[in-house]
Image (cartoon, rainbow, N blue to C red):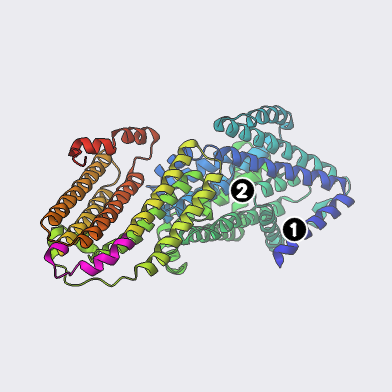
């Protein structure tokens, strides 16, 4: 209900403001231009995702100080803590970084966002930056019209900067003209009542604008025009810090439990920082005056002193909270609990992980491993083998021969609940991710991952067909039939074991060679089974009807193994395009395999 009336209410308030005050119209237009500039700037940086930003984030999370430094540096560069928060939540949801690293990035971004106040107070109000806006807009739009993704990204960045400068100019002009008709400073409230009131207003404004940068620009331009008092401006800045957490909270709604924990950590940090700033306001003001005197800031230059205050209380918050990050992680894991995802529910793919193309690819990769685990469970049970047996060093032929019972398995029900639904979710996610603008390399990766998901489904479907006869003949009294089906079971179990061994080793230069060896082993086992079957038919050890069934089941077993090997090639292949191309050239194709084994099928 509130959502339905919120936007119309905003329209009514704005329309009324436009009607009673032309100056308000200028301020609102300046704010709109500024916000649109931020969107363009974020779009420009998103054009380069899948490259340096993700690589840097991945490498900057093995130490707490690196995570915090990355948060500071990236937010200073991007001038958008919202974008950094969304990228961090996206990486966390995809399982690419841990919660402690994500918290470090978010804490650092809070300090990095203070550079925006310095740029506006130190440059935006001292220089006629609107003069720089025009060429930036011209060159920016020109580059946006180009086809190369990198050029368009640069174009969006230049256009965003131009719009930011233009928005600051109009907001400043609007507040300067506004004081001729009404002086908002007359509504100032002093003391702690004013601090809490204006902190609440600052938080509400930031929630509405979805940008603490925009709120700070409003505060600084209003302060420069003497429309608000210095004391009330400080309270508004404190409130803006609390309100900015709404971006992380909204981004975490569609994230997994780790993303939600990160949003809570962001809220805890900003609330504690705000409370410390309010409780120790007078000592902080003394520190601001001391720093201002030592750096040559004029006593009455309240905009720069506001920038000093904004930086100071965020720095104090970081110093207070950083030593307790590990303890905070423990508390979040203890109290922010969401029931573990069921086997049939996606764990990594979400709206949060689709925002960034690179994390969309990695979240699909991890979700495919989840789907593979479900398929592994079905296939191993279908073979009447425990997973622990397959993973052990025990001789598989011996383990299969020792089978004393057929494991119960409702294979159709298992397929519907744990394979089909998850596969459908993956395919739907990939389709949405491919609709996002991403590099050719990432698009190709998504296409390959979609094929890998189909490989899993095809393997499971083949197992469904095979299981009927396996459950029937595993304990057959006919030793010839039992041995042939045991050979089929060993063939599939060997592929599962070999893939697990390669997966545990991690991707390296030997992966493709190892998978070629698995494929060769599969082909050799299949041909050996065919030869054994031919001999059994010639010697009339089995009936022609049974031979036909075993031939079909041998084909199903081969399809299971081949699909699993193809899946492993995709999941375990190198991530870098150059290495991936080299691996594909090294990989054996069907003709190569025939040459190695000798094509004796003609």
The range drawn in magenta is 463-481
Instruction: Tell me which numbered mark, 1 or 2, is placed earlier along the sequence.
Output: 1
Up/down of 469 relative to 362, above or below? below
- Residue 287 located within the stretch drawn in magenta: no
Q: What kind of element bears circle 2?
A: helix
Report the front residue among 493 and 234: 493
Task: Name the residue carrying label 1.
Answer: 7
Question: x and y percent of residue 85 in the render?
Answer: 54, 50
The tag on residue 541 is none
Q: Relative to the observer, which residue lies in front, 274 or 423?
A: 423
Q: How many marks?
A: 2
Residue to which mark 2 is pinned: 309
- Quarter of the figure with the N terminus: bottom right
In the picture provided, is 310 more to the left or to the right than 59?
right
Give the alpha-carbon distance from disc 1 to disc 2, as whole Å: 34 Å
* Quadrant in the rendering for residue 123: top right
């Amino acid at each position: 209900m509130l959502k339905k009336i919120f936007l119309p209410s905003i329209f009514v308030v704005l329309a009324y403001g436009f009607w009673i005050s032309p100056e308000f119209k200028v301020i609102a237009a300046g704010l709109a231009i500024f916000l649109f500039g931020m969107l363009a700037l974020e779009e420009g940086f998103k054009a380069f995702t899948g490259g340096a930003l993700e690589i840097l984030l991945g490498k900057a999370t093995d130490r707490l100080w690196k995570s915090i430094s990355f948060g500071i540096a990236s937010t200073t560069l991007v001038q958008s803590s919202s974008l950094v928060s969304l990228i961090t939540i996206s990486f966390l949801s995809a399982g690419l970084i841990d919660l402690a690293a994500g918290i470090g990035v978010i804490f650092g971004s809070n300090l990095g966002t203070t550079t925006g106040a310095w740029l506006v107070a130190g440059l935006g109000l001292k220089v006629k930056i609107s003069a720089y806006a025009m060429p930036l807009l011209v060159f920016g739009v020109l580059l946006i019209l180009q086809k190369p993704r990198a050029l368009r990204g640069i174009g969006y960045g230049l256009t965003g900067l131009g719009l930011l400068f233009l928005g600051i100019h109009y907001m400043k002009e609007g507040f300067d003209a506004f004081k001729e008709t009404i002086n908002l400073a007359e509504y100032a409230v002093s003391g702690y009542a004013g601090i809490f009131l204006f902190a609440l207003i600052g938080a509400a404004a930031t929630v509405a604008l979805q940008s603490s940068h925009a709120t700070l620009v409003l505060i600084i331009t209003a302060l420069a025009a003497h429309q608000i008092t210095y004391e009330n401006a400080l309270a508004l800045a404190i409130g803006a810090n609390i309100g900015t957490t709404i971006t992380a909270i909204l981004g975490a709604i569609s994230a997994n439990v780790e993303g939600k924990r990160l949003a809570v950590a962001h809220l805890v940090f900003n609330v504690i920082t705000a409370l410390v700033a309010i409780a120790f306001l007078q000592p902080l003001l003394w520190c601001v005056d001391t720093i201002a005197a030592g750096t040559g800031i004029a006593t009455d230059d309240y905009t720069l002193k506001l920038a000093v205050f904004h930086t100071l209380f965020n720095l104090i918050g970081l110093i207070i909270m950083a030593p307790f990050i590990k303890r905070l992680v423990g508390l979040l894991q203890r109290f922010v609990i969401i029931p573990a995802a069921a086997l049939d529910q996606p764990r990594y793919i979400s709206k949060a992980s689709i925002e960034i193309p690179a994390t969309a690819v990695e979240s699909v990769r991890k979700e495919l491993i989840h789907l593979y685990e479900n398929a592994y469970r079905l296939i191993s049970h279908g073979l009447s083998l425990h997973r622990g047996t397959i993973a052990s060093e025990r001789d598989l032929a011996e383990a299969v021969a020792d089978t004393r019972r057929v494991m119960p398995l409702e294979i159709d029900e298992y397929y519907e609940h744990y394979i089909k639904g998850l596969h459908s979710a993956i395919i739907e996610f990939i389709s949405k991710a491919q609709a996002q603008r991403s590099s050719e390399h990432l698009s190709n990766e998504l296409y390959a991952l979609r094929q890998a998901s189909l490989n899993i489904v095809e393997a499971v479907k083949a197992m469904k067909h095979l299981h009927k006869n396996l459950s029937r003949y595993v304990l057959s009294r006919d030793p010839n039939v039992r041995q042939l089906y045991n050979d089929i079971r060993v063939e599939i179990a060997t592929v599962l074991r070999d893939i697990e061994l390669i997966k545990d080793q991690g991707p390296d230069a030997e992966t493709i060679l190892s998978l070629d060896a698995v494929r060769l082993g599969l082909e050799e086992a299949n041909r050996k089974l065919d030869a054994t079957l031919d001999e059994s038919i010639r010697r009339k050890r089995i009936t022609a009807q049974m031979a036909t069934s075993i031939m079909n089941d041998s084909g199903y077993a081969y399809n299971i193994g081949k699909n699993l090997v193809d899946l492993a090639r995709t999941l375990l292949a190198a991530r870098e395009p150059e290495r991936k191309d080299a691996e594909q050239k090294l990989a054996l194709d069907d003709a190569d395999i025939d040459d190695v084994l000798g094509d004796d099928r003609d």
